[in-house]
């Protein structure tokens, strides 16, 4: 055999060995992807395709208010706890109310809060992950001071009522009003005033930037920062928001004596203290996050409320009867809605609970396991993410009978206590929404004005869609007319 033939043979053998090694490595890598290591028993589920996991199935738009098919199939096949991979992250998704409550209670012990990369880029990685709990507790105390029951009773309630009346009155005489746009304008104007002292007439452009951010947050699994992409436009909106809020902060810091009775007043006081807990960058990112959270979920809820009432006339009539009883008991015709009236409304409370149950506009929260955690016979490995899904609880037919039916009567006093165990529209634990009571009051006040003063006719639209956990109200056009 010639040397050249021996060389070729050896070269081919080496190439074959290299190819075999590569195939073996790939097979081992794929096996490890499908069967990740665990010091215990992982929950059932599929990790999807290597690298992308089940990201695209998870973010697929569902054209209804129902639980997306992604959750439905896995709930039926695996039960309320299952594993997956989303955006390259190993995740355990919990649709189990008891497990969710356990995770809420163990934050800071077995779990820590975690945010997707898109959220970190938009609202500030330093603000969300670096600052200690003292800083976040401080901001939470500020929010409670503004939106807690005491301040609502003393000063906010009359202003909210006047603002709602003015907004709804502006719809009269128009052949068609797009509800989500009209409601979001009303809510954002109020939020901008009480958080940053911005007049409602000057808040329109800021709201547009936040709407751009919202569209990207719920629909972009892999954000690509390149001119022309949605994420690029989103980050431009983020820069515009940052610029506006930076200017507000600088102006207020330079004239601390000018008080507006808003959140910035409290932040400026802290920043000018001897040993401030936060810095200006943290404050601006926090204001951005709070502005977003104050209007995006609630505007979708109120838009959907119009549709619920339109499609359920028996609920409308029962609400009208309850609220007209309040009007009859008032001493003066011009008396406003009071905290005592709000607390006396039993059927309205049932309606608000049902609205919050079905809409569940607060997206599921992520936590990261700080150690291996045993839950319901399964092990969540250290470093894995856990996603808590209130929507998956509220729309589970085993927990709520006929879950898509808008049925306020399911919340009667006899049933309410058992129902509350599976009810978590505002999260839980140390990160439960600090404005829970404000949210309920806002919806109740809205119902009070609408059912006692208006009727409306459907013009077009009114559908909603879900993108994973997030409910998105699509265009809904109505004609609003005063009751005669």
Image (cartoon, helix red, strand yellow):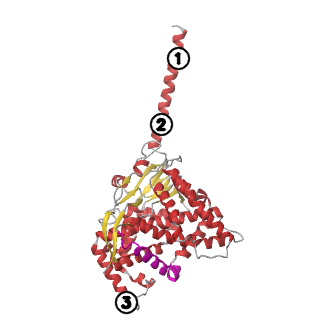
Q: Where is residue 264? Give x, y as percent.
A: 60, 71
**Magenta span: helix, strand or loop, mainly?**
helix
Which residues make up the magenta segment? 149-174
> Could you tell me how far apart the alpha carbons at marks 3 and 2 are, in whole angstroms?
75 Å
The residue furthest left is 314
Where does label 3 land, which residue?
329
Q: Where is residue 179? Give x, y as percent.
A: 38, 67
Please give the label number shown on residue 426.
Answer: none
Query: In front of the other: label 3 or label 2?
Result: 3
Does the magenta segment cover residue 182? Answer: no
Horizontal relation, residue 244 to residue 443: left or right: right
- Mark 1 residue crowding within 10 angstroms, few (<14) / some (14–19) / many (20+): few
Q: Secondary structure at mark 2?
A: helix
Where does label 1 land, which residue?
10
Mark 1 or mark 3: which comes first in sequence? Answer: 1
Identify whether 116 is placed above or below 146. above
- Mark 3 residue crowding within 10 angstroms, few (<14) / some (14–19) / many (20+): few
> Could you tell me how far apart the alpha carbons at marks 1 and 3 are, in whole angstroms?
100 Å
Residue at 28% x, 73% y is 313
Q: Where is residue 26? Give x, y as percent.
A: 48, 35
Q: Secondary structure at mark 1?
A: helix
Q: Is residue 194 visible?
A: yes
Q: Quadrant of residue 298?
A: bottom left
The one of 139 and 454 positioned closer to us in this rendering: 454
Query: In front of the other: label 1 or label 3?
Result: 3
Horizontal relation, residue 99 to residue 458: left or right: right
Horizontal relation, residue 59 to residue 265: left or right: left
Where does label 2 land, which residue?
28
Query: Which corner quadrant holds the C terminus?
Result: bottom left
């Amino acid at each position: 055999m010639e040397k050249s033939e021996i060389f070729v043979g050896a070269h081919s053998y080496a190439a074959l060995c290299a190819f075999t090694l590569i195939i073996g490595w790939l097979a081992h890598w794929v096996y490890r992807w499908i069967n990740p290591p665990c010091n215990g028993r992982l929950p059932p589920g599929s990790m999807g395709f290597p690298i992308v996991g089940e990201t695209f199935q998870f973010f697929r738009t569902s054209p209804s208010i129902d639980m997306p098919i992604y959750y439905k199939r896995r709930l039926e096949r695996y039960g309320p706890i299952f594993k997956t991979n989303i955006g390259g992250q190993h995740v355990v998704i919990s649709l189990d109310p008891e497990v969710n409550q356990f995770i809420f209670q163990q934050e800071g012990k077995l779990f820590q809060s975690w945010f997707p990369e898109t959220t970190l880029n938009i609202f500030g990685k330093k603000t969300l992950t670096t600052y200690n709990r003292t800083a976040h507790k401080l901001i939470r105390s500020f929010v409670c001071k503004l939106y807690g029951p005491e301040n609502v009773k003393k000063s906010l309630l009359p202003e909210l009522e006047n603002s709602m009346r003015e907004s709804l009155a502006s719809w009269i005489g128009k052949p068609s009003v797009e509800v989500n746009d009209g409601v979001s304008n009303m809510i954002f104007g109020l939020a901008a005033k009480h958080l940053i002292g911005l007049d409602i007439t000057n808040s329109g452009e800021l709201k547009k930037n936040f709407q751009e951010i919202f569209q990207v947050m719920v629909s972009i699994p892999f954000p690509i920062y390149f001119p022309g992409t949605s994420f690029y436009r989103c980050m431009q909106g983020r820069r515009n928001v940052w610029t506006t809020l930076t200017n507000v902060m600088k102006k207020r810091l330079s004239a601390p004596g000018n008080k507006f009775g808003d959140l910035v007043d409290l932040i400026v006081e802290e920043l000018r203290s001897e040993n401030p807990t936060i810095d200006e960058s943290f404050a601006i990112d926090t204001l951005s996050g709070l502005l977003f959270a104050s209007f995006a979920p609630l505007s979708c809820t109120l838009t959907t409320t119009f549709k619920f009432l339109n499609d359920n006339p028996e609920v409308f009539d029962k609400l009208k009867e309850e609220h007209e009883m309040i009007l009859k008991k008032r001493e003066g015709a011009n008396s406003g809605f009071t905290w005592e009236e709000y607390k006396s409304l039993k059927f309205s409370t049932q309606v608000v609970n049902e609205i919050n149950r079905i809409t569940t506009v607060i997206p599921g929260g992520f936590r990261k396991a700080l150690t291996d955690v045993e839950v319901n016979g399964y092990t969540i490995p250290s470093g894995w993410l856990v996603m808590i899904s209130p929507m998956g609880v509220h729309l589970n037919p085993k927990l709520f009978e006929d879950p898509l039916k808008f049925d306020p009567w399911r919340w009667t006093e006899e049933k309410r206590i058992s129902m509350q165990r599976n009810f978590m529209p505002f999260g839980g634990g140390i990160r439960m929404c600090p404005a829970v009571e404000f949210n309920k009051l806002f919806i109740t006040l809205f119902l009070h004005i609408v059912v006692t003063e208006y009727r409306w006719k459907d013009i077009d639209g009114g559908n909603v869609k879900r993108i994973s956990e997030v409910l998105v109200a699509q265009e809904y056009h109505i004609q609003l007319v005063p009751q005669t």
